[in-house]
Image (cartoon, rainbow, N blue to C red):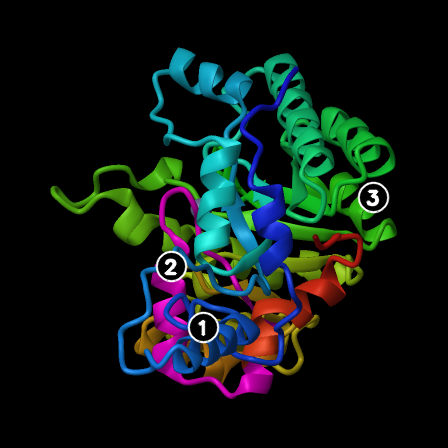
Amino acid sequence: MTVTGMGGASRRKFFASCACCEPTSARSALPMERRSFLAGGLAALGLGTVAAPAVQAQPAKTRIDVHHHFLPPTHREALTKHKMGAPKWSPQMSLEEMDKSGIAVAVLSQVQPGTWFGDAQESRSLSRAINEYGAKLVQEHPGRFGLFATITPLDVEGSLKEIEYAFDTLKADGIGLLTSYDSKYLGDASFAPVYAELDRRKAVIYVHPLAPNCCADVVPGIPPGSIEYATDSTRTIAHLVFTGMSQKYPNIRWIFSHSGGTLPFLTQRFIQQQKVQKHPHLPNGPIPEFQKFYYELAQGNTKAQLAGLSDLVGVSQMLYGTDYPYRDGAEVNDGIAAWKFSAADLRSIENETARKLLPKLKFA
Ligand SMILES: [Zn+2]
């Protein structure tokens, strides 16, 4: 298959400096040396008070976006066949958005509902096509993309084969899962062989929510995206923790979407659940387990959301994410800017923690 939509290499190279020590913003658009050059040049010409000409400037690209979707043609065709909507997307759209929002590398992941439409063979061939397309994008755009490979753990045998292919042949950076498959959440005992293999590989799993089977059109006029996606993230986090599945496979590093969904706001209820259920694997309650996970900030970056997440896990577990093409980087950039993280915290969230988790990522 061919991946098209390249370009802008020389321009990217010009702006691809490592400015990780200066908090980036879509508004502080020019690299420092370019700003100094413009100011100095204008002053020398006696034009210091004249407004600088409009420059199509871009921010220094330092951010690593761990929540960035891609939609290979094969996946689009499958979604259309199953009468499901699909967003407009192309590689070039992603690259333009990344340049605009200061994103160095986007780690690509599937769009929901993934590849499971009830048929294991279809799911396997679709996952393979998605993963090969993603790997080709990574290869064709050095230093701009990473890949969370798609598997469907309902199909254990197919998942084990795809894990091997994704890591050993395609060199994927991690695995992308959805919060639930049919009505099974990620603590389901039948997924254990998949986790055992991912634990052995010390894999990163990025978990994306979807509209769960249980809860379509619960409240007229309130779409699933407003409540159910976030809640499905919390359901699956709770399931992993209370079943003991995440403790059983401690080498897996979990990343959850949208600041954990509704997790920060339900912690007292989960503390109470443990008081009643008294799971022996949670002697200190569920909070220490929640604190081991990572959370990206797409659509989870209002002050209320960041206050809750900051109190629950702290900056060391936060990652930068946009949810492109459903949302753009400006939204999360604005949310992060309004919270006024320190420069060190920004570096941690936007770059350093992701680099540690995903050491195979390359940078242009
Ligand atoms: Zn998303």
The quarter of the picture where the N terminus appears is top right
Residue 17, position as x, y percentages in the image: 65, 65
Q: Judging from the image, what secondary structure is the residue with disc 2 in?
A: loop
Q: What residue type is labelled 3?
A: Glu
- If you read the primary sequence from the N terminus, does the residue marked by circle 2 or circle 1 appear first? 1
Residue range highlighted in magenta: 317-345
Whether pointer 2 and pointer 1 mark residues with C-beta atoms closer than 8 Å, the reply is yes
Say which of 33 and 95 sits in front: 33
Q: Judging from the image, what secondary structure is the residue with disc 1 in?
A: helix
Q: Is residue 275 magenta?
A: no
Residue labelled with disc 2:
55
Q: Residue at x 21, y 43 (%)?
A: 218
Q: Nearer the viewer, mark 3 or mark 1?
A: 1
Q: How many labels does the image show?
A: 3
Q: Nearer the viewer, mark 2 or mark 1?
A: 1
Q: How crowded is mark 1: few (under 14 residues within 10 Å), some or many (20 or more)?
A: some
Q: Residue at x 67, y 42 (%)?
A: 147
Whether pointer 3 and pointer 2 mark residues with C-beta atoms closer than 8 Å, the reply is no
Q: What residue type is labelled 2?
A: Val
Residue 106 visible at all:
no
Query: Residue 250 occupies which quadrant of the picture?
Result: bottom right
Q: Nearer the viewer, mark 3 or mark 2?
A: 2
Q: How crowded is mark 2: few (under 14 residues within 10 Å), some or many (20 or more)?
A: few
Q: Which amino acid does label 1 sit on?
A: Leu
In the displayed structure, 236 sits above or below 193; it is below
Residue 38, label in figure: 1
Name the side, left or right, on which 356 lies relative to 90.
Answer: right
Give the CA separation, mark 2 to mark 1. 10 Å
Residue 305 visible at all:
yes
Residue 197, label in figure: 3
